[in-house]
Amino acid sequence: MKSKGFEGMACSIAGVLDAVGDRWGMLILRDLSLGLKRYDDLRRSTDVTHATLSSRLKHLEQSGLIERRQYQTRPDRFEYLLTRKGRDIILVLQALAQVGDKWAITGDAGPPLRFVDRNSGRSVKLAVVDEKSSERVRSRDVRPQAGPGADDLVRWRLTKFDA
């Protein structure tokens, strides 16, 4: 049974989740962000079934996160590339990796993947910063607030926030 969609929901998080589709979609985006482009490489990396991979690639393309480009004829073969919108997902991937590393999800051997500054080679991490000053803000000092697109349900949720 297909789950209920997120249409009409005033929630940016739900919108991104809908665009990605599911965990397979996220792993496909991970692989594309790492430079994998071809169907067989994506299949090998994820070990997902052909049917699932094909379905997720179509969904990601329809969502505008990836584009399909032909690189061979006879037989026709395509590669998949992140769009500008799809490249924005890299922030979400980095955040998931950062939390997984903090929790030592993959064990005691250390992070399986690091993100580094291209110029210095030093590790980088995501942080919350003040939009105007770019100064770092502690997570415990961040609180949600209704934005201009908030509806009654968003405002109701915010009444439940325990500051």
Image (cartoon, rainbow, N blue to C red):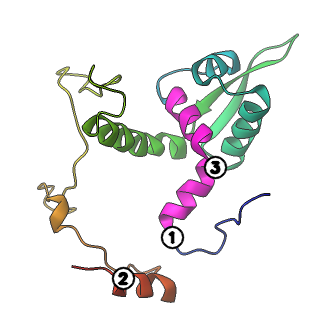
Amino acid type, residue under disc 1 in the picture: Cys
In the foreground, 108 or 162: 108
Q: Which mark is residue 158?
A: 2
Amino acid type, residue under disc 3 in the picture: Gly
Circle 3: is it few (<14), some (14-19), or many (20+) Cα within 10 Å?
A: some
Of mark 2 and mark 1, the one earlier in the sequence is: 1
Residue to which mark 3 is pinned = 21
Q: In the rendered view, would you say 126 is above or below 123? A: below
Of mark 3 and mark 1, the one earlier in the sequence is: 1
Circle 2: is it few (<14), some (14-19), or many (20+) Cα within 10 Å?
A: some
Q: Residue furthest right?
A: 74
Q: Is residue 21 magenta?
A: yes
Q: In the rendered view, would you say 8 is above or below 35? A: below
Residue at 55% across, 40% down: 26
Q: Which residues are magenta?
A: 12-32
Cα separation, mark 2 vs mark 1, equals: 13 Å
Q: In the rendered view, would you say 81 is above or below 92? A: above
Residue at 80% across, 32% down: 51
Q: In the rendered view, would you say 53 is above or below 16? A: above
Q: Under tag 3, what secondary structure? A: loop
Amino acid type, residue under disc 2 in the picture: Leu
Image coordinates of residue 145 in percent, x first then y, are: 31, 78
Q: Which mark is residue 11?
A: 1
